[in-house]
Image: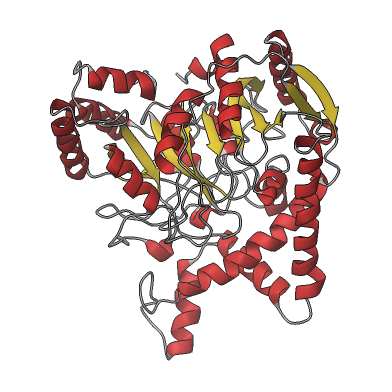
Amino acid sequence: MHKLTLKELSAQLQARKISATELATLFLDRIDASDLNAFLHVDRELTLAQAKVADSRLSGNNAGQLTGVPIAHKDIFVTRGWRTTAGSRMLDNYVSPFDATVVEQFNAAGTVTLGKLNCDEFAMGSGNENSYFGPTLNPWDKRAVPGGSSGGSAAAVAARLAPAATATDTGGSIRQPASLCGVTGIKPTYGSVSRYGMIAFASSLDQGGPIAKTAEDCGLLLNAMTGFDERDSTSLQRPKEDFTRSLNDSLQGLRIGVPKEFFGAGLAADVEAAVRAALSEFEKLGAKLVEISLPKTELSIPVYYVIAPAEASSNLSRFDGVRYGHRAADYGNLDDMYRKSRAEGFGEEVKRRILVGSYVLSHGYYDAYYLQAQKIRRLIAQDFQNALAGANRQCDVIMGPVSPTVAWDLGDKTNDPVANYLADIFTLSTSLAGLPGMSIPCGFGQGEKNGKRPVGLQIIGNYFDEARLLNVAHQFQQATDWHLREPA
């Protein structure tokens, strides 16, 4: 039962072949037996109480497609009843008095919460090694990172500890862990999913999305989690849509843009081979490959690591030890309490980004760094529009690798933050432009120290083109079985 897709589990529940309580218990038992450190907080009593309500809805013919389906939430979404830590000592043992909008939406749909998932501290990282509670392990090879910051979400779905999970993507944190763990994940257009109750890292970049086994499952999850929210000033007013409506459309004549900048120096040969093979599969499905150029791609790393830390330094100023969160036990005065509480509560990577952000926003450097980064951000977005929009558009979607390598070993990049930053080279530009992007499994690469590790194919579309991306991914998954492979 744990190997079924979300859609298949829904069918089993609707047919009353299994109850929501039985299904939740099955996954809770699997979580208890796991050693991946994917979950930070599980409360069997709370979960089974939700499952009991779902069973009542199912028996009373008052159920939707997601009623009774178990999911887990990245520990960046605040939740009533469960702890919300953002992977940080600063929020250790914090329990929110309210639910994030995304959590509310899934509760309204009748899903059953299995628990809270590990993540890089305040979503800052590429390998899930920055969590105060220790790293999550990659289920394909426990020596490897699962990717970050949504590593707990990707690892839990890959290991079949949950059929689906929520996640967030600031610079690639849905797509990259989905790639490294061999699952499917989609970051929708910025503003499509409410950020209310999502602990902020970089407000102009953070976006929630789902991770699941298949593109079809991701579409069902997006149906529930998107929509306007007046409590979020960045939420877009758009009518609700069915993201699964185009899944079975033909790919005949689809133009796939292949950026030459995504296949240069730095891309591992095993990753390139898997991505090229996937592109060939799309040609068999009737698509046409078109070489395009995204010339500002290499600038996305310096631009992102100016803008994101700047916004983080502002967002994280609220954690001062006064109202909630960690407070130092020993201090002399208020100023001393601020300093010690923040020094003890934040990890090294978070401190690094706060310092960088404060620097680029400081008097004398704002124009030289932050303002310039915002100007280049606009040029990066324009590169995508030249390819995807207008009467002279070159392609319908863009494809390439998600990560330049397969998952690296735990500890390999711990002392080299720049090496971690470079792992996001192919995902950052999409986030800076606010475009939708997704990762689907497309093969395996050879790990540096033997053992096969997953490779993901990235699919990028124009604004609000999620239904097309899911259609493209679904057709590939109908023709291949990479998404069905699972770790031992």
Q: Is residue 330 left or right of residue 131?
A: left
Residue 474: where, in percent of width, then height? 55, 20
* Residue that appears at 69% across and 74% down: 361
Quick one: 448 or 82, which is closer to the camera?
82
Residue 145: where, in percent of width, then height? 55, 38
Residue 80: where, in percent of width, then height? 27, 55
Q: Is residue 427 left or right of residue 264?
A: left
Q: How is the image coloured?
A: secondary structure
Looking at the image, residue 184 lies above or below residue 419: above
Q: Is residue 61 left or right of residue 211?
A: left
Taking the view exactly as shown, the residue that stands out farthest to the bottom is 333
Quick one: 443 or 488, which is closer to the camera?
443
Looking at the image, residue 108 lies above or below residue 345: above
Q: Is residue 307 left or right of residue 212?
A: right
Q: Quadrant of residue 345?
A: bottom left
Residue 452 visible (yes or no): no
Looking at the image, residue 6 lies above or below residue 104: above
Residue 244: where, in percent of width, then height? 48, 26
Residue 187 visible (yes or no): yes
Quadrant the N terminus occupies = top left
Quadrant the C terminus occupies = top left
* Residue that appears at 28% across and 43% down: 108
- Total marks in image: 0
Q: Quadrant of residue 307?
A: bottom right
